[in-house]
Image (tube, grey):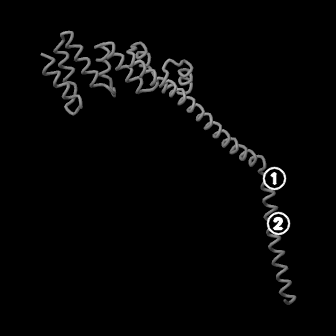
Amino acid sequence: MSLKENITMVKEELSTEEQFFEQAVKTERFVKKYKKPLIAAVAAVALAVVGTAAYDAYAASKRDAANAAYMTLQSDPANAAAQQTLKANAPMLYDAWSMSEAIKSGDVKTLQALASSPAAEVSDVSSYEAAAIAGDAKALGSYGYRQGALYKEMALIDEAVLLMQSGKTDEAHRRLQMIGDQSPLAPLAEALSHYGVK
């Protein structure tokens, strides 16, 4: 190598080192200038990650406790500790379980209380079952006129049967006509209309 090539190579190395140091100085100034916001951002991200992990662990713990309590109640419905655990960890599941137990035992008071459950399906089914078990034609009628009722047509048939039993055949006939031809209960309504209502 000649002296010129050595000098050129040294200049290039110095130029590269200068650029490196220049970038290092710029980075150092940036970090000094924005040190607090950078630390705050890193801390916020760390807290968010830890918070999310903690919440997920808490939710999983509640879910596992509710599942264990529900499984216990399947085999031992009278277990008060399992009922409390289920109610505390999964109130809507507790309402659904309470509704199924009340339907099995014919407990109208419990069903009426569950009619105000925050679980929409539990509330709806409990309203229907309470009226059907009690044989309350008025409650069945008001349920049957409710928009979006799950057992609307069953309530109309139940109400029609109760009206027939009390001798109000014209009213019963009107209730049965409210069941559409496309309904799966249309054949039953037709049969009741022809053979039950005279």
Q: Is residue 94 left or right of residue 157?
A: right
Residue 30: x, y in percent? 78, 56
Check the picture and name the quadrant holding the C terminus: top left
Quick one: SS at disc 2? helix
| Label 2 with label 1: CB-CB less than 8 Å | no
The residue closer to the viewer here, 86 or 69, is 69
Give the numbered dot on residue 127.
none
Of mark 2 and mark 1, the one earlier in the sequence is 2
Residue at the spot of label 1: 32
Q: Nearer the viewer, residue 67 or 180?
A: 67
* Residue 5: quadrant of the picture: bottom right
The residue labelled by disc 2 is: 21
Q: How many numbered badges does the structure rendering display?
A: 2
In the visual, does 128 lie left or right of 38?
left
Q: Is 10 rendered above or below residue 179?
A: below
**Residue at 21% across / 29% down in the picture?**
180
Given residues 6 and 192, the one toward you in this image is: 192
Q: Position of residue 152 (x, y in %)?
A: 30, 25
Vertical position of residue 13 compared to residue 49: above or below: below
Question: Which residue occupies 17% across, 19% down?
Answer: 173
Residue type, numbered disc 1: Lys
